[in-house]
Image: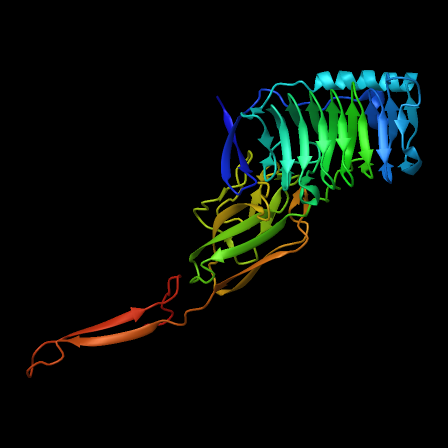
Amino acid sequence: MNCRYVGVVTGIGLAVILCSPVRAFAQVSPSLGTAGSYSVLAGSQVTNTGATTISGDVGISPGVGPVPHFTGFGTVTLGGAVHDADVAAANAQGDKNTAYGALDQGCMVTFPGAFKELAGATLVPGVYCATSFHLTSGTLTLSGTASDVWIFKSSSDLIITGGAATSVVSPSCDVWWRVVSSATFDANSSLIGNILADTSVTLAAGASLSGRALARTAEVTLSSNTISTCVAPAIPPALPPSLAKGFSPASIAPGGISTLTVTLSNPNTSVATLTAALTDTLPAGVVVAPTPNASTTCTGAGAVVAVAGSSTVTLPVGRSIPAGVGFTAGECTMTVDVTAPASGTYVNTLAVNALQTSNGNNAAAAVATLTAPALGPPTLAKSFSPISIPAFGTSTLTITLINPNATIATLTAAL
């Protein structure tokens, strides 16, 4: 069985490793149909006490007893309309029931025991199943993107306690709570998502829900609550990639070899793919070494183009910079060996917009300097061996010609 890692921290601070089977298909967010405009939907009645704010419609169907099936609405600020045992409410209940059935998807993780405590947990997108879900005095973190889906299937209850210390952090509004029995909120507690309860939903004083409270057979009970439309956090624009470069060593003798490394960085959580080739033109006087040793760690197809003796090195279109993780940017490199036959100081620049990717272009130039200092003229050294001889003895005179440069020094006059 394939597994993936899910980190969970319990409310008492115990670290747990949760291994969850990878499903062959992804969880699917159901359509609510006409129920999509409803913030509250009940089967029997809706009761309210205190100042409550409801962003959407309220519906009751079929209702129990004579109309009206809602009370305490004189202190409700309502963003929609009340549909009491009418055709619209009946249609909404039907569509909600269809969505309830569609949420009965295969479990990615089934938690054992009488209930699963969600406080302190960090969960990736998936379908999570338990006898009952509890969220008490802590934060449930849903780790993913705005397009991801979480489905929680409780075969009995959903219980939210802990007051203001209880919260859900989610990048998405596609969070679904399928509850076979009832959902209850403690005072001042909060939740994100769409609750589809087969029986009832109860919110104690000051509790809030960013989503919907939809009950099939029984009542929805409110008390100075806020039920608002869930708004997913805005997706920030992609940050542009960046370039850096350097020579190693940064100083060589004329004709020596240095490795040029160009580092491509991607601060985004999505891969940055080159939409145009990245070409670095070497400064005059610097060329690709006789053995280029050109390579790249950027993923994708196509070799680095670097011809010995040429003045350019190119990373082909289609290569990709890895995605960043957290606050750490994804990086890859392009390397090539270069040489400078003559002495000098050589400044190598990759201009703004030289790197063009699916996440944007580099906003700052990348600069590196290679020096090949002149080592000076040839020098002479001489010695006798032996240095002391008797009269008419023999000693060998050795004259040593020293050339510190990488190029041959040819005598232009007799020595």
- Residue 379 picture location, percent across and down: 33, 73
- Count of picture labels: 0
- Residue 252 picture location, percent across and down: 44, 61
Is 123 placed left or right of 189 in the picture? left
Q: Image quadrant for the C terminus?
A: bottom left
Does residue 179 appear anywhere in the picture? Answer: yes
The residue sitting at 91% across, 22% down in the picture is 84
Is 54 placed left or right of 266 in the picture? right
Is 55 placed left or right of 382 in the picture? right
Does residue 149 appear anywhere in the picture? Answer: no
- Residue 369 picture location, percent across and down: 54, 61
| 277 is higher (above) or lower (below) than 365 | above
| 76 is higher (above) or lower (below) than 308 | above
- Residue 151 picture location, percent across and down: 66, 26
The residue sitting at 76% across, 30% down in the picture is 202
Q: Nearer the viewer, residue 384 or 225?
A: 225
Is 117 placed left or right of 39 in the picture? left
